[in-house]
Amino acid sequence: MSTSYQSSAEETAPAPENYLTSSRGIASWIFTLDHKRIGILYGVMILLSFAAAGFIALLIRTELLTPALDRAPSGDQYNAWFTLHGAIMVFMVIIPGVPAALGNFVLPLMLGAKDVAFPRLNLMSFYFWLGGAGFLLSTLFLAGSTKVYGVDTGWTLYPPHSIRTTQFASLALTGVFLLGFSSIFTGLNFIVTIQKLRPRAMTWFKMPLFLWAIYSTAVLQVMATPVLAITLLLLIVERTMGIGIFNPALGGDPVLFQHFFWFYSHPAVYIMILPAMGVVSELIAVHSHRHIFGYRFIAWSSVAIAMFSFIVWGHHMFTSTMSPLMNAIFSALTFSVSIPSAIKVFNWLATLYKASISITTPMLYGLAFIILFTIGGLTGLHLGTLQVDIHLHDTYFVVAHFHYVMMGSALMAMFGGLHHWWPKITGRTYSELLGQVSFWLIFIGFNTAFLPQFVMGSLGMPRRYASYPADAGFTGYHIASTIGAYIMAVGFVVMFVCFVQSLAAGRKAAANPWGGNSLEWHCAAPPPHTNFETVPEVIDCYDFHDWRYDAASGGFIKKTTAPGRVPA
Amino acid sequence: MRDSRDAPDPIPPVEPREVWPPYAKGQSLPGAGVLGMWFFLASLTMPFLAVFVGYLVFRATYQPWPPAGAPPLPALLWVCTGLILCASIAVHWGLVSVRAERQARVRAATLAALVLGAAFFACQCGVWHEVWRGWEGVLAAHPAAAPGEQPAVPAALRIFVVTLFLFTSLHAIHVIGGLVLQTVVTIRAFRGVYRYYHHPGITYSAMYWHFLDAAWLLVFLALVLGSR
């Protein structure tokens, strides 16, 4: 850029080595064992998948703009659209989004470690992801006997339809199976890394809260995903050999599939939301420049959510012929999840109280998370209530609820974290103006798209329908929803422009642009290949007093005052 | 065996491999592998528990169990149990021997575990053969109502045979992985790679075969006690 700060001197002097420049060539990327590069590989592929699934979402919303089935080629094609939108978003984007992309990059840095415990396993996980993604996406280009491109089972893959369908469901099942292995090995790697690679002085309760969240998530990934794997394997065998385990026509039990599926897929919801909560704990504390309130409560609530997640799967099946007693038990257990969730929200609010909040783009995402997660969480109580759920089951109320939790919470936190760590990852600053414009477009678009869905859901609009009666009063809500989806799409385009502009012409970022104090901010930006030459000194990662803003470098630098510390 | 059992073993020195990241030059992170293995085995346990629960559901659904006309459980299941228990003992013997630096015994133990594991798998194939023969008997006893139609096998009978087959083959898939692992470990043991102070392969394969042993006992007891 044309700014004149030290330009000539700095450009002629050899830049210090960093992980991007330490080795060159395509092979140094595809065979890399560096956690930072693997994180980048994941990040790029996940964002591409997000764009693809987002595009499919626009197709869905365009079809629903008018009551008639007029824009999708056929109703079956519409089924394939929402199936692939869901499957790609869940298995390829949100589940690996925060842990595998951001987590891979940040986790060893936060620990002051040189890498994860098993770097080769880490690379292998990425290739499992890539292979699984290849299988799942290949169904996009294959038409079954009905000239429909894609799989039409819904992302939940319920039999008996998933057994009978003539689409290439087995390919998609194989894809999700492989993606599951990627998830398991990533989780395994992170568990061992966190347990074994912490510096001696970093006890469990001195870890950044992001690591508590990642650890809880990793336990879920390791213990719940294998159940999905065996379920998918059984479904593949069922489709190819007709053994009859899940096929009621042959004496099997399709509800057993639902139990198996939700035994994984409910914990999977927390695999998506827990790392997001970890990101938000970092965002809220760093950008409000105040010590996180209730550290231990936030840490333990992550563990509590992980444990509760294993015993509430039945609330997805209130209408699937479970006994009234089981329904009541699962309903009661479901309500208990709200306790650790609320603990987190109240501690974040207490952290914000009387803090000197910087309204930066990551902070906006963090605040949006609190609002949207609260809406998503509280509408979950309606669905957890038995009688209300009978009415709301399979309506747009459910669609709106899980979009508030998955998109409004998990993905908002992912994009907040991406902005938060972007200067660390790339070594470049991004345009705060573009960042905030894209945030507001996404935030407004999101609420325009999904708030009306609560209303039309409770009025009775069923989910997964390509058309609806013109005189039922749903049309206005659908139009609003579609307009919101397009506003969001514009927001993501602006975000893309913002990132491209940053990479092409962004100013060189300071090592600590936000004033954070966890160990990744003690490292250069971008970090060198080996992260830290020596084991860094472990300090309270939420004590921000030792940093002061330095206008020249555009970031925070250490106060030079010796022991007697002056509060900021 | 390439040399007599009591001769001192000429052991080639362990080549220090380049390890990234450099936690300590030429070494992997102490304790990480075993911890990772524990979580990996915990993870592998979950599918067995899932299939076990599925088995219990079907057993409770279809009364009486085993259904009338069901083929008897293959007697080879008992032989399989004996073989995998012996394999478990063999890997433990290998672990004890390598800690005592008894290289000849390490070679014998790893090879024995490999042979016993392969014998278990062969025995397992025999089990499936017997199950298949039983299934053919069931098909013969319930012929199709008209030519060209499916045989009219009662649902309970079909589910009984299918769960028997699935439960054992889930275990067999893991045994194949164990055989690959044990082959590598045996070859490396014969090369004298494992020393009393550094023998990760022996440790991991021992843990894995103990897991296979425990998982088999779950399968075996569920089938035997469940079919009474």
Image (spheres, coloured by chain):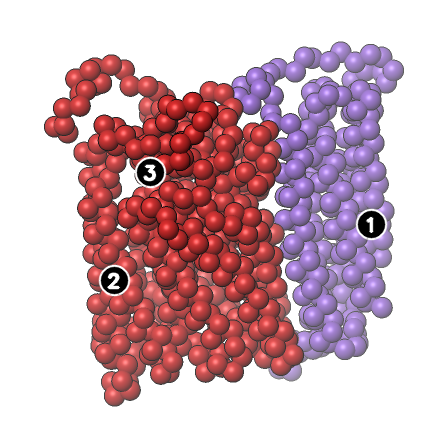
Quick check: do tags 2 and 1 share a chain?
no
Outermost residue to the left: A2
Q: Nearer the viewer, residue A29 or B107?
A: A29
Question: Can you tell which chain is drawn red?
Answer: A
Which amino acid type is marked by label 3?
Trp
Which amino acid type is marked by label 2?
Ile
Disc 3, SS? loop
The C terminus of chain B is located in which quarter? bottom right
x, y (%) of residue B101? 80, 20
Label 1 close to label 3 by CB (< 8 Å):
no
Q: Nearer the viewer, residue A460 or A156?
A: A460
- The 10 Å Cα crowd at callout 3, few under 14, some 14 to 19, many 20 or more, is many
Chain under disc 3: A
A201 sits to left or right of B164: left
Q: Residue at x 79, y 52 (%)?
A: B217
x, y (%) of residue B111? 77, 30
Q: Residue at x 58, y 19 (%)?
A: B24
Residue B210 sits in quarter: top right
x, y (%) of residue A503? 24, 35
Marks 2 and 1, how far apart in space? 63 Å
Say if A62 sits above or below A176 in the image. Answer: below
Which amino acid type is marked by label 1?
Thr
Q: Nearer the viewer, mark 1 or mark 3?
A: 3
Q: Name the residue beneath numbered marker 3.
A: A514
Label 3 close to label 2 by CB (< 8 Å):
no
Q: Nearer the viewer, mark 3 or mark 2?
A: 3
Marks 3 and 2, how far apart in space? 26 Å
- Give residue B81's mark: 1
